[in-house]
Image (tube, rainbow, N blue to C red):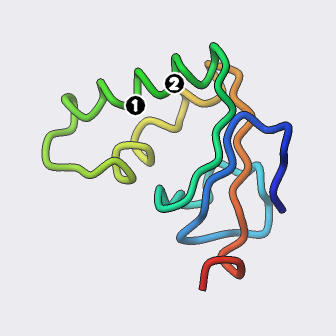
């Protein structure tokens, strides 16, 4: 379920029924992000991480960096159920 107070809501490729579980597979095709110092810092890191993982797309890079970066930066991420994106 969409959360208007989360830092980031993101579509999922695979959704395990738990919206805050980082084991869900994000799909970068739909995101709603609140602009704040946490999200700005994370998006800068995400963008810079593309240099660390050449040949990977943004979604793959997010999967590679979400542990521990999301928790370390204190982001509240909500993964949206795949039933909304069929």
- Residue at x 77% of width, y 57% of height: 19
How far across and how far down the image is residue 6, in percent?
A: 79, 38
Would you say 28 lies left or right of 57 here?
right
Q: Is residue 53 above or below residue 28?
A: above
Q: Which residue is mark 1?
A: 46
What distance separates the C-alpha of mark 1 from that of mark 2? Answer: 6 Å
Nearer-the-camera pick, 6 or 56: 6
The answer to whether mark 1 and mark 2 are in CB contact below 8 A is: yes
Identify which residue is drawn at 69% across, 28% down: 75
Q: Quadrant of the N terminus?
A: bottom right
The quadrant in which the C terminus is found is bottom right
Report the side of 6 relative to 42 (left or right): right
Looking at the rendered structure, which numbered label has been put on residue 25?
none
Asked where in the image residue 83 lies, by quadrant, the reply is bottom right
x then y, percent, for residue 69: 54, 26
Tell me which corner region of the image, top left, top right, bottom left or bottom right, holds residue 50.
top left
- The residue positioned 62% from the left and 78% from the top of the image is 85
List the single residue furthest toward the bottom. 86
Q: How many marks?
A: 2
Which residue position is annotated with label 2? 42
Tell me the element at label 1: helix
């Amino acid at each position: 379920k969409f959360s208007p107070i989360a830092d980031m809501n993101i579509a999922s490729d695979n959704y395990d029924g738990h919206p805050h579980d980082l084991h869900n597979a994000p799909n970068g095709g739909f995101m709603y992000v609140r602009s704040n110092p946490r999200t700005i810092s994370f998006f800068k890191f995400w963008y810079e991480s593309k240099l660390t993982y050449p040949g990977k797309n943004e979604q793959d890079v997010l999967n590679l960096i979400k542990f521990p970066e999301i928790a370390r930066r204190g982001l509240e991420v909500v993964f949206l159920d795949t039933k909304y994106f069929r």
